[in-house]
Image (cartoon, rainbow, N blue to C red):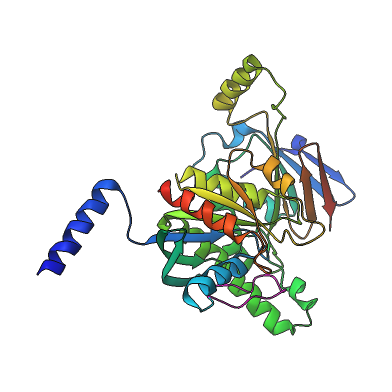
Amino acid sequence: MSEKRGNNNNLKGLSLHVLPFSEIQYLSITDRIKKILKLILGNKVVILQGRLKVEEEIRLVEDTMAMIDHVKQFRGIELAVIEPDMKEANLIDKMKLGLANKLSGGANALTIIGPATVVKEIKKDPKKLEIYLG
Amino acid sequence: MIRILKAFSKRILNSLFGRKEEIKLGFYGPPNAGKTSLANTICKDWTGEEIGKVSEVPHETRQVQVKEKVVVEYKGKKLTLKIADTPGIATRVDYEDFLKFKMKKNTAKKRAKEATQGIIESIKWLDDMDAIIVVLDASQNPYSQVNITIVGNIVARNKPVLIVGNKIDLKKADLKKIESAFPEYEIVGISAKSGQNMDEFYEALFRLAKKI
């Protein structure tokens, strides 16, 4: 797997990796999770355009647990998904978003996944998201 | 002979009308939400025995614990359950978290290893369940991704789900937060520790059983 230099930003030791949906679009579940976990093992916080499917999320949890047992110093991940609040949106806007999500794997959402040793906690409520670093 | 015929016809009728003789009911949720406490309350109410040990240390349940033939009789209705109390699902397990509870390093490491295996086991049992009770701690933020992942996976598997907000006896408890996080699902607030609102829980349990 090659990392795009332009997608990496370093901020006082914190390394973010922006993963566009197009980079994982055609990968199988196994390869998607492998790619994400490989980045996390490199101590990177992954910002994924879109969101994982429910079966991918649970697979990510399973593979993470298996890795805690096998990789020294790996304690797991912190994960959060931010999606636009559509409660107040009208029907047309909801339909537009629904169609866009179908075509792009939920591209209006952002998924943040980081190693638990780097990201201590992600606190989420509908209006804000706070990331506490370890 | 008559008994055999009776049992046979009952089985045929049950399969025709979709009624199960024993409902496999899974208790899922994050660690320390009170899954075992609730399962214990139900088992004690109807069998006189508990299903497992509870503790303030997270990941006390590290293997799926099963209690079969739990017959719940409530307001003239009857339900036979096979209760599966599962290890709490988390995305991180850090043995150092257990050291805060005065645990020795080796014991903490062993507990962490068992906890990770328990989480994988919990997920594997999901498919085998007929209905799921998701137990959340009503005093904690319900918007964690783990909670959303658990509920999402249950719904994707077409399993009927009841969300229980436990620990409503605590001052910090806020059931409304759970209701706004999961507006499409039935939510019942209880305290498994004090037995508060268990009547409402049993009513909801019978409604859940009808959806199977």
**Residue B100, percent from left and from top:** 80, 76
Residue drawn where x is 41% and y is 60% of the image: B79
Residue drawn where x is 77% and y is 60% of the image: A117
Q: Is residue A105 visible?
A: yes
State the predominant SS element of the stretch in magenta.
loop
- In the image, residue B165 sits, relative to residue A19, either above or below, namely below
Taking the view exactly as shown, the residue that stands out farthest to the left is B1
**Residue A118, percent from left and from top:** 79, 56
Residue drawn where x is 83% and y is 45% of the image: A130
Image quadrant holding the N terminus of chain B, namely: bottom left
**Residue A15, percent from left and from top:** 80, 47
Q: Is residue A34 visible?
A: no
Residue drawn where x is 55% and y is 34% of the image: A25
Quarter of image, res A88: top right
User: Is A14 positioned to the left or the right of A78 in the image?
Assistant: right
Tell which of A88 and B9 is nearer to you. Answer: B9
- In the image, residue B117 sits, relative to residue B183, either above or below, namely below
Quarter of image, res B177: top right
Looking at the rendering, the stretch of residues picked out in magenta corresponds to B51-63
Taking the view exactly as shown, the residue that stands out farthest to the front is B76
**Residue A33, percent from left and from top:** 57, 48
> Is B171 one of the magenta-colored residues?
no
Quarter of image, res B168: bottom right
User: Is A16 positioned to the left or the right of B29 in the image?
Assistant: right
> Is B59 one of the magenta-colored residues?
yes
